[in-house]
Amino acid sequence: MTELLSPEALEYALRRIGEERYHNRHPFHKLLHGGKLEFGQVQAWALNRYVYQAAIPRKDAALMANLEDREIRREWIGRIHDHDGLGPDQGGIERWLKLTDGLGLDRAYVMSQQGALPATKFAVEAYVRFAGSRPTLEAIASSLTELFAPAIHAERIAGMLENYSFIDESLVAYFRKRLDQAPRDCRFALAYVKQHARTYEQQKAVIDALVFKTDVLWAQLDSLYFAYVEPALPPPDAFVPAAHPGK
């Protein structure tokens, strides 16, 4: 970025980040969606991803603590309800736990996060701190990976149902729900960023914020690949997959 962009050019620049840096390009996801992982490796992914899922409402609460505009808070709080649940909807975290239940992982163990990789925890906490410490414009911009999420969810649903006998429709409920939720959320966030990023410095900051978020997601997959694929060296106290008869 070398000059002030129009709102439309800014949106294009943000979408290009997804094309170049979103974690659907990571080798681990290519293995996951292509049915190339063993059962224990899928378990490890779901267990570690829980750390991120559980932190999303904390991230949004940290962001909301800095919002002085009541109307924006009214809009943003729906994200917390999506994950923590509200009324009859038990929320995204519960849907993720049903996935880990279905993969044979003890729920208390998953929720304790004791077996999660250190790099997963560090990356996720960095995101929570970012959302609570950076200006509102940057914090909102960091959520714009939701622009790219529906495509990866659709790919994941199809790939996992087709390639793994231990995955059925009930275990992909989280991803089905996000196909509707993510576009709704990113419409608001994208409109906010395009309206409020009015200077070169602000536009560069929102681009940097989205790059940071893609780094957070990429780092989690780097740690999974190192621990469970190649060289397959999980750190002390991390989850160790047990033998499984097949896919």
Image: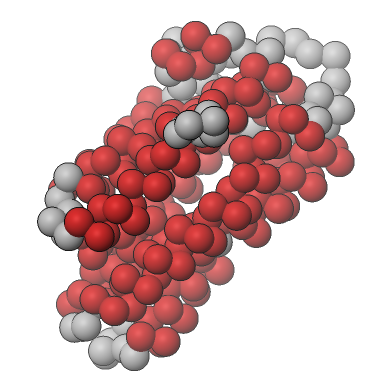
The residue at 37%/73% (across/down) is 191
Q: Quadrant of residue 142?
A: bottom left
**Is residue 175 in view?**
yes
The residue at 63%/53% (across/down) is 179
Q: Position of residue 73 (x, y in %)?
A: 26, 53
The residue at 31%/35% (across/down) is 58
**Is residue 119 in view?**
no
Q: Is residue 129 left or right of residue 88?
A: left
* Residue 112, above or below 44: above
Q: Position of residue 232 (x, y in %)?
A: 59, 25
Out of 33 and 106, give the one closest to the viewer: 106
* Residue 165, above or below 238: below
What quarter of the picture does the N terminus occupy?
bottom left
* Residue 196, above or below 244: below
What quarter of the picture does the C terminus occupy?
top right
Q: Is residue 65 left or right of residue 104?
A: left
Q: Position of residue 26 (x, y in %)?
A: 59, 50
Q: Position of residue 31 (x, y in %)?
A: 71, 42
Q: Is residue 94 left or right of residue 197?
A: right
The residue at 54%/52% (across/down) is 181
Residue farthest front in this picture: 87
Q: Is residue 241 left or right of residue 209?
A: right
Out of 94 and 5, give the one closest to the viewer: 94
**Count of numbered labels shown in the rendering:** 0
Out of 71 and 185, give the one closest to the viewer: 71
